[in-house]
Image: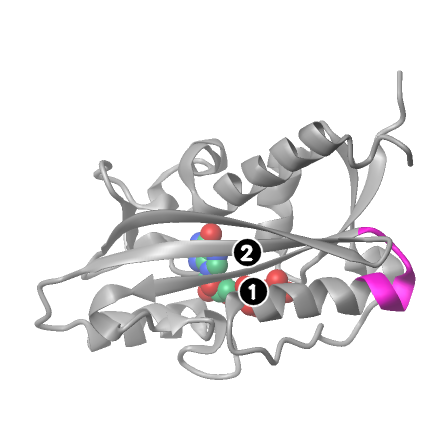
Amino acid sequence: MKQKSRLYLATQNKHKVDEIKDLLGDLFDIHTVYELGLSEEIPETGNTLQENSKQKAEYIAERYQVTCLADDSGLEVNALGGQPGVYSARYAGESKDDMANMSKLIQALQGISDRSARFVTVLTLHHAGQFQSFEGEVIGDILTAPRGENGFGYDPIFQPKGFNRTFAEMSMDEKNQLAHRARAIQKFKSYVEQTGFFGNN
Ligand code: ITT
C-alpha cells in the first residue's frame, strides 16, 4: 500500500485540528505545528480571510520547509455588514474567549430581526513554493442564546439553514457533513484527486 503523504496543519486551534483529522486522516499523514516545536503564535495580520490563510501557510511552510494546509475562518453576520468576519476570534478582545465573543454578538443583534449569517473557511495549501486556496461556506441563523456543548467558537449560537439544532448540538460527524470547513476540505480533496498533486511525493 502506498504511504500516505505528510501534511502539516498550520493552525493552533485544537478543534480545527480534530475536525480536519476526522475529514482527511484516511488520506494524509497529518501533523500539527506543535510537532515542529512552534511555540509562538502564527502571525495573522491580513484584512481578509484569504490574506490570513495564505500568511499562515507561508509562515509555516517557509520556516520548516514542509507541505502545509492553513485554515482561516470567520462568521459573517448580514445585519452587521459581515462582522465579525476576519475578526471573529478576537471579536470581544485579545483573549479569544468563545463565551465573550458569543455574548457580544448576541448583544449586537438585540432587537434585530435579520439573524442570517454565514460561516466561511479559506484553506490554503502551500507546497514547494506554490499556493492553492479552497473556500467553503454554510449559511444559517444566529440564535438569541447558546445551545449545546459540542464544537467550539460560535457553534452554540449558529443554526445551519434547514436544521433545528445548532452545530454545538451536533456530533463532529454531523457537523462535518455540512459545515464550511468540511466544504472547503471537499474542494481540497477534489483538487488533490484531479491533479494527482501528492502523487510524486
Ligand atoms: P488559528 O489561527 O491558529 O487557526 P484561530 O482560532 O485563531 O486559530 P481563526 O483566526 O480562523 O482561527 O479564527 C476564527 C474564529 O472564528 C475562531 O476562533 C472561532 O471563534 C470562529 N470559528 C471558526 N470556525 C468555526 C467553527 O467551525 N465553529 C465555530 N466557530 C468557528
Mark 2 touching mark 1, by CB under 8 A? yes
Mark 1 neighbour class, 10 Å CA radius: few under 14, some 14 to 19, many 20 or more:
many
Left or right placement of residue 19 versus residue 177 in this view: right
From the image, tell me which residue sits under label 2: 122
> Whole-Å distance between the Cαs marked 2 and 1?
6 Å
Q: Amino acid at mark 1?
A: Gln
Depth check: 130 or 53 in front?
Answer: 130
Left or right placement of residue 172 versus residue 167 in this view: right
From the image, tell me which residue sits under label 1: 50
| Residue 67's disc number | none
Q: Which residue does the image show at 49% across and 37% down from the upper left?
A: 172
Looking at the rendered structure, the number of numbered marks drawn on it comes to 2
- Segment colored magenta: 61-67
The N terminus sits in image quarter = top right
The C terminus sits in image quarter = top right
Secondary structure state at the residue bearing disc 2: strand
Q: Please say whether residue 148 is visible from this viewpoint.
A: no
Q: Quadrant of residue 198?
A: top right
Q: Amino acid at mark 2?
A: Val
Residue 101, percent from left and from top: 38, 72
Secondary structure state at the residue bearing disc 1: helix
